[in-house]
Amino acid sequence: MGMNVKISNTLAIALSLSVAALVFGFVFLNTALFHYDAIVLAEAVEKTYSTLRLQPSTNYRYADVVIVDIIYFPFWLRGSTADFSVRLAGVIFYSASIGMLYLFLKKFTNNTLLSLVAAVLFAVSPIYLSPNTFGKIHSISIFFLLLSLWLLLLPERKNFVLAATAYSASIGSRESTLFFAPFALSLCAYSVWKSRQNIWQFLYFFIPLLSFFFLLSAWYFYPIISKTLNGTSVETAFFTYSSANMARALNDLTRTSGTLISLAALVGMISGVVTLRFPAMFLTAWLLSAFFYFSNYTTYEARYLDVVLIPFFAFSGLTVSYLTNKNRIVGYALFGLLLFAPVSYSTQLLLPRTAYNGIYEFGKLISEKTEPDAVIIVQNEAPVVGYYGKRKTLGPPTGNEAESIRFWEDVNKNVTKGENIWLAFSAFFDDPGDINKQIVSQIFDFSKTYSTINEDYHHSDIRQLLYITYLWKLAPKQNMSESTSIPAPFVLKGFPSKK
């Protein structure tokens, strides 16, 4: 009877954490999608319904598409787009992962306060909360990773099979969680050893996991795995040590969490390692190796550190738990102080976005001001133009003057024929040597000019960068001796007030 009550209390706390996180997530829910990948996911979901064939998202992340497809169904019946469904999925799995983190750490460490502190800090961290409010969903992979690890601590055959399934779903959502395979396997072995079961129980996790891995590889996954692990791709060159990247990642981690949390995590890790107990050694290895791996992506973004936050906050929770055992008032006061920095950071970053989404406003401007048959020249905001602006796009070459000259000469011919071609300011974002900008200023006039306030979605997990963006309609040049003026970007310091 006692065991049943204990389990019920644990589940009740986990459920309460998830409900509170759900409310917190909705408070900061963005007004629209706010990332390239988020829009690609929404398009994949909608295309799945229109074609009745499962479509991949970025990097062939089918798991995200399947899950959002389920959430999207009632909205599809109403004729809505998948915009809200993607954002809703992010918040739902964000909240579910908070409760799941508590369950995993409680089972693994048998420390209620440590688990509670870690889960709450994880919930309010801008690194984890932010992308899940604007559709750049990491919470699906995190939830299934934590579910898998929790199931591995319940050493029964069916749980091991379910753990393999959950871990495969995590990889299908975010291929980089393949990094945690050694941790999952070692946790499975530890669980079998601790429960004094036959070592062959391990195979109930290993064989299904291996089967899922080969199934995914045969279907679509092999090139993704190769790109993820071997570092041959320029876009994802991992294991290329970069002190600058690691310094930036450390700054992101400490700046968003606060000095106090960072110190508490350091003290907790040292005190945990001294005990030489498996949970402490496991979490230390997780923290150090994951930080090294994910901070050395050539495409590093702060959100990559969300998996690092799990042991980081667990060690902060260990420090709070230790102090609470010595003096309850001091321990609880420290917990309250730890919350201040991440909650303050998240509020200042995310609250303005609940009223204004720059890339949505940019898409709306295009939809309202350009002709239905217009073509918009743009770079990586192309999905925004297609999804919110409902216009076709064209991307200029970058870094090659000969190709750029040919490209703009072809555009000029089409403009001369009377085609409606517009130029977005973001077409010059990646323009080494201002090659494209110089060519445009020499061969085009702007017959119409519109502007709006946009926000750069790059590095937006923990940063705000607002700027004035422009939209120009191209026209043949009337006076070839004069260059067309193209303004420099004008960065703003605050969000526009809500109308």
Image (tube, rainbow, N blue to C red):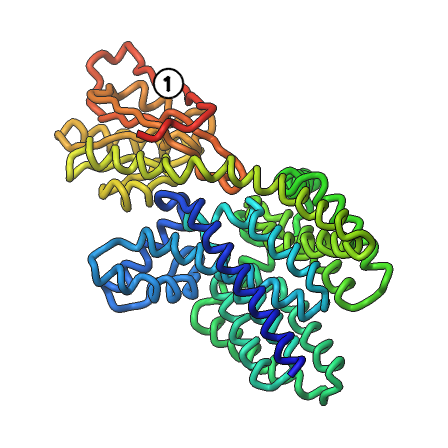
Residue 221 visible in the displayed image: yes
Residue 142 against residue 495 in the figure, above or below: below
Residue depicted at x 37% and y 27% = 497
Residue 175 visible in the displayed image: no
The residue lying toward the viewer, choosing from 172 and 252, is 252
Image check: 303 left or right of 391?
A: right
Image check: 318 left or right of 482?
A: right
Q: Which quadrant does the C terminus fall into? A: top left
The residue lying toward the viewer, choosing from 250 and 344, is 344
Other residues around mark 1 within 10 Å, as few (<14) / some (14–19) / many (≥20)? few
Q: Which quadrant does the N terminus fall into? A: bottom right
Name which quarter of the figure residue 220 lies in: bottom left
Circle 1 — which element?
Answer: loop
Outermost residue toward the top? Answer: 481
The x, y position of residue 462, in whole percent, is 54, 39
Outermost residue toward the left? Answer: 418
The x, y position of residue 251, in whole percent, is 66, 38
The x, y position of residue 140, in whole percent, is 48, 61
Residue 425 against residue 488 in the figure, above or below: below
Q: Which residue is mark 1?
A: 487
- What amino acid is found at the position of numbered circle 1 in the picture? Pro
Residue 195 against residue 144 in the figure, above or below: below
Residue depicted at x 22% and y 11% = 479
Name which quarter of the figure residue 72 lies in: bottom left
Image check: 445 left or right of 112?
A: left
Name which quarter of the figure residue 249 lies in: top right
Image check: 414 left or right of 233?
A: left
The x, y position of residue 342, in whole percent, is 60, 42
Residue depicted at x 67% and y 51% = 291
Residue 128 against residue 205 in the figure, above or below: above
Residue depicted at x 23% and y 25% = 474
